C-alpha cells in the first residue's frame, strides 16, 4: 500500500525552464526581421508580399511568444516575495532550472531575486511561525530526553486516563482506505432522425464513461475523513477525538511510522493508516519514539533530521 508523499515544491520552476528558452529565440526572430527591413526599404509595408515575407511570418510567432514571457517577469516578482516570506530556499532549490532561467532571461531571475529578498525581509506567515515553534519544541524535547530527563506531563482538561499525559494539542486528522462504489450506467432511448439518434447514443456513452471514471476515482484508496481534531498522547497510546468519540491507537501495534515535514503517519496491522498533520507532528514523533521504548529510540530513521538539529552548534 502506498500512502503518498509530500511533493517537492517548485514544480513551476521546471515549467519555466522549459518555456524560457523561447525568449532568446523570439528576440532572434525580431532582430532577423529588422535586419531584413533595413536591407530592403519598403518591405515593412509589403508584409507577406515583400522580400521579407518569411521574416514577417516569423515575427508574428515571436510576438506571440513574447506575451507569456513578459507576463513571466511580472509573475516572478510575486513568486519571489511568496517564496522569500515562506522561507523557502532560493528558487525552491531548483538550481538547474534557475541557471536556465538566468541564462535565457536575466531580467526574470533578477526580478525574482529582488522579490525573494523583499519576502525574506517581511515577517513570516503565522502558520510558518507555528511550524517553527513546533520544530524547536521537538528539538528541545529530543535533547532533554537524550540527556535522561523525563518527559514533561500536562494536565488535559476533560480527559481522564490512568496513564500520564505528555501531549494535548490540535492536529489535522485523516485515514487511508478505499471504498466500494456502485455505478449504475444510464440508458436512454431516442427517436428522430438518424443523426439525432446517433448523437444521443454517443452522449449516453460519454456520460457513462465519465460516471464510471468518477466512481473509480471515489473507490480507490486515498486519504479520507479530513478534519481537525484534539490529539492526546499518553505513555502507550495516541488518542484522537473524532466526532465526540475517543479513538485509541496503541503505540505497541504500530508497524511503521513516517515523519515528513509537518505530517506523521502510522500504519497498523488490522486498521487503516492514521495521518496527523500540523506543527506538533515533530513533537509527536519524538514522544512516540521515546515512549515506544528501546535503547535505540534516538536512532529511529524518522528522527534523523531532529537529531541532526539537536546536535548542531546552533541548537546547542
Image: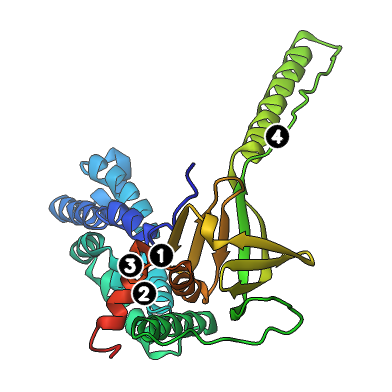
Residue furthest toward the top?
194
Position above or below: 255 against 314: above
Q: Earlier in the sequence, mark 2 or mark 1?
A: 1
Q: Secondary structure at mark 4?
A: loop
State which quadrant residue 135 falls in: bottom left
The residue lying toward the viewer, choosing from 173 and 74, is: 173
Residue position for label 3: 296
3 or 1: tag closer to the N-terminus: 1
Q: Residues within 10 Å of mark 1 (few under 14, many from 20)?
A: few
Of the pair 285 and 127, the residue shown nearer to us: 285
Q: Residues within 10 Å of mark 2 (few under 14, many from 20)?
A: some
Residue position marked by numbered label 4 in the rendering: 180
Q: Is residue 234 left or right of residue 67?
A: right
Q: Earlier in the sequence, mark 4 or mark 1?
A: 1
Label 2 – label 1 distance at C-alpha: 23 Å
Q: Position of residue 290 (x, y in %)?
A: 44, 72
Going from N to C along the chain, the mark reached first, 2 or 3, is 2
Mark 4 vs 3, N-terminal side = 4
Using a 10 Å C-alpha cutoff, classify the residue at mark 3 as few (fewer than 14 neighbours), some (14 to 19) or many (20 or more): few
Q: CA distance from mark 2 to mark 3?
A: 33 Å
65 vs 204: above or below = below
Q: Secondary structure at mark 3?
A: loop
Residue at x 70%, y 19% (from the top left corner): 202
User: Looking at the rendering, in which quadrant would you find the C terminus?
Assistant: bottom left
Q: Nearer the viewer, mark 2 or mark 3?
A: 3
For label 2, the residue is: 88
Percent of width and height locating residue 111: 31, 76
Q: Residue at x 28, y 56 (%)?
A: 17
Q: Is residue 179 above or below residue 184?
A: below
Amino acid at each position: 500500500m502506498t500512502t503518498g508523499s509530500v511533493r517537492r515544491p517548485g514544480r513551476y520552476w521546471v515549467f519555466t525552464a522549459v518555456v524560457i528558452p523561447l525568449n532568446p529565440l523570439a528576440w532572434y526572430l525580431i532582430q532577423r526581421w529588422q535586419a531584413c527591413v533595413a536591407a530592403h526599404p519598403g518591405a515593412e509595408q509589403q508584409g507577406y508580399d515583400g522580400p521579407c515575407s518569411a521574416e514577417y511570418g516569423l515575427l508574428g510567432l515571436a510576438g506571440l511568444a513574447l506575451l507569456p514571457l513578459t507576463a513571466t517577469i511580472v509573475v516572478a516578482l510575486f513568486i519571489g516575495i511568496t517564496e522569500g516570506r515562506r522561507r523557502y530556499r532560493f528558487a525552491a532549490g531548483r538550481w538547474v532550472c534557475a541557471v536556465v532561467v538566468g541564462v535565457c532571461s536575466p531580467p526574470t531571475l533578477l526580478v525574482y531575486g529582488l522579490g525573494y529578498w523583499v519576502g525574506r525581509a517581511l515577517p513570516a506567515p503565522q502558520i510558518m511561525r507555528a511550524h517553527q515553534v513546533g520544530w524547536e519544541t521537538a528539538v528541545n524535547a529530543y535533547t532533554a530526553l537524550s540527556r535522561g530527563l523525563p518527559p514533561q506531563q500536562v494536565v488535559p482538561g476533560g480527559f481522564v486516563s490512568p496513564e500520564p499525559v505528555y501531549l494535548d494539542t490540535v492536529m489535522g486528522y485523516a485515514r487511508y482506505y478505499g471504498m466500494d462504489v456502485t455505478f449504475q450506467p444510464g440508458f436512454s432511448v431516442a427517436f428522430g432522425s438518424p443523426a439525432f439518434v446517433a448523437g444521443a447514443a454517443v452522449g449516453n456513452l460519454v456520460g457513462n464513461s465519465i460516471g464510471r471514471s468518477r466512481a473509480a476515482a471515489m473507490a480507490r484508496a486515498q486519504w479520507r475523513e479530513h478534519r481537525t481534531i484534539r490529539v492526546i498522547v499518553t505513555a502507550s497510546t495516541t488518542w484522537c477525538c473524532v466526532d465526540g468519540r475517543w479513538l485509541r491507537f496503541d503505540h505497541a501495534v504500530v508497524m511503521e511510522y513516517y515523519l515528513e515535514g509537518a505530517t506523521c503517519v502510522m500504519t497498523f496491522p488490522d486498521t487503516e493508516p492514521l495521518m496527523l498533520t500540523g506543527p506538533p507532528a515533530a513533537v509527536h514523533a519524538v514522544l512516540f519514539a521515546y515512549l515506544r521504548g528501546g535503547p535505540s529510540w534516538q536512532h529511529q530513521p524518522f528522527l534523523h533530521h531532529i537529531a541532526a538539529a539537536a546536535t548542531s552548534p546552533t541548537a546547542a
